[in-house]
Amino acid sequence: MIHCLWLLAGLVPREIAETMDKRKLEHYRNLLEARRLNLRTSVARTEEDGRAAQVTDSAQDIVDRASSSYQKEFLFARSNSDRQFLQMVEHALSNIAEGTYGECEQCGDEINERRLEAVPWARHCISCQEKLERGELEQQAQEG
């Protein structure tokens, strides 16, 4: 009851605030780990599909060859996209481990919780992300 009154008055004891932060971090960690598992599964499946496409590449018909070539290009692009996405997710998990998760990598401000809920692998706050997309900021080299 006392903790409820403190919360209502805006006087949150440090232990409660830290526990809430730990819960939020655990929530984001769980979201990111689930996404990482899905991406790893997708990458593995795409690699298997790519190997299967190479085995059936002995098609004689020119239409079959064109279709096979398109399929290989599509699988390569999908695999590449999934790998880049996986790097972003792993980078966010690394930030959680280092204690820097939720900080904009450009300006150092805190990334809004609603943004992290929608995009838990976000590296930039909304303002910096918009500037980045307009070409007003250079994206820092991604570690990986």
Image: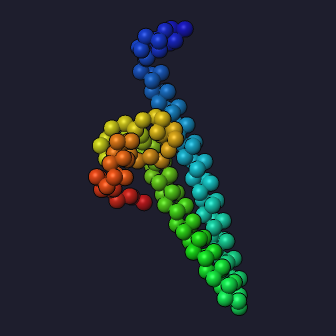
Q: Is residue 19 above or below residue 125?
A: above
Q: Residue at x 60, y 64 (%)?
A: 43
Q: Residue at x 52, y 41 (%)?
A: 118
Give the x, y percent position of residue 91: 45, 52
Q: Is residue 94 above or below residue 66?
A: above
Q: Residue at x 44, y 46 (%)?
A: 122
Among the 4 quarters of the image, the one containing residue 14: top left
Give the x, y percent position of residue 98: 41, 45
In this rendering, does residue 104 appear at all? Answer: no
Quadrant of image for the N terminus: top right
In the image, farthest residue toward the bottom: 60
Q: Is residue 143 above or below residue 66?
A: above
In the picture, measured across the screen, residue 84 lies left or right of residue 53, that is left
Give the x, y percent position of residue 120: 50, 44
Q: Is residue 93 above or below residue 50?
A: above
Q: Residue at x 43, y 17 (%)?
A: 13
Q: 139 or 39: nearer the eye?
A: 139
Give the x, y percent position of residue 9: 43, 10
In the picture, measured across the screen, residue 104 lies left or right of residue 3, that is left
